[in-house]
Image: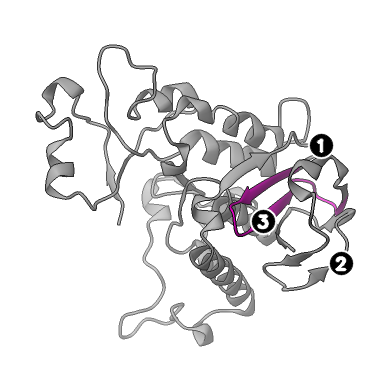
Amino acid sequence: MPIELIPIITPTKNLLPTGLPAWRRSFPGISMFGEVWVENVSTLAFYTKNNGLNKDFNYNLPSVKDFPLSFALTDALTQKNEWLTGAIRLYMTLSQDFLYENPYRNVLFLDNHDLSRFYSTMGEDVDKLKAGYTFMMTTRGIPSLYYGTEILLTGYTNPDGKVRQDFPGGWPGDPTNKFTAAGRTRKENDAFNYFKKLANYRRANPVLQSGKMTHFVPEDGVYVYFRYNADKTVMCVMNCNDKPMTVATKRFEERTLGFAKAKNVITEEVLNSLENIQVGRYTTLVLELQ
């Protein structure tokens, strides 16, 4: 289980003779990440191990919370799709991954205990929430879901305590119990079941955990990327528009060549042609190519 740390990091000169920090020698199976709250990739990468940016010392931090990518995700779903805003923010942020030794160790999140709830930031638009969650679960890195997002908890940081409320239920006398389907509303169950299905798919398919990633420059507010390994190829189509879009796939032949159809991971519907793909408003499709 990852441990969140404030970034007070041991520099290389203080490491033990083995070259490993003391905590790594004592607990080699632990994964750790640091919270470095910055908005640009180069500054965040500076604090990570073996990044090539530090000349005098190495922070040896194996993983960080990916604030730049999380902020870009919010922008993609709330800004107009223009030259430097909207969906292009995701592409431009991920295109700087070469600054990290291993960007697959970065921890991606929608929100946390210091940020307004993602659902509130999205104007309580369930489609946007699902689109953001789907991106988080299918892009490179390690997803981290803040409790309550799966049942549509709301709140703004004014102050932080408003986004740290108790999860409803679990104690005698609680008026509602969101831990059970019976205690959740139809809308909450729809979100919960969506999150659960995609999380279980990711857990069962290494392609979304460690598979390589190829992404393409967004066009008309639609961002397309692929996760793939020797066994599977998953195509993700993220529509950052408030209307359905039709996506012609010819320019993605680098990754689609040899595939004839696809299965929608969420609905299990089979698409018998990949020539054009229909994607709803603020929707991220997850398609397992066949």
Alpha carbons under labels 3 and 1: distance apart: 20 Å
For mark 1, what is the residue?
A: 219
- Mark 2 neighbour density, 10 Å: few (under 14) some (14–19) many (20 or more): few
Q: Is residue 163 on the magenta stretch?
A: no
- Compared with 204, 82 (above or below) is above
As drawn, is 271 to the left or to the right of 171?
right
- Compared with 51, 81 (above or below) is below
Q: Secondary structure at mark 1?
A: loop
For mark 3, what is the residue?
A: 234
Type of residue at label 1? Glu
Name the residue at 81% across, 58% down: 280
Residue 20, image quadrant: top left
Name the residue at 20% across, 49% down: 28
Nearest the viewer among 215 and 176 is: 215
**The N terminus is located in which quarter?**
bottom left
Nearest the viewer among 208 and 42 is: 208
Alpha carbons under labels 3 and 2: distance apart: 16 Å
**The C terminus is located in which quarter?**
bottom right
Q: Secondary structure at mark 3?
A: strand
- Overall secondary structure of the magenta stretch? strand
Name the residue at 12% across, 24% down: 14
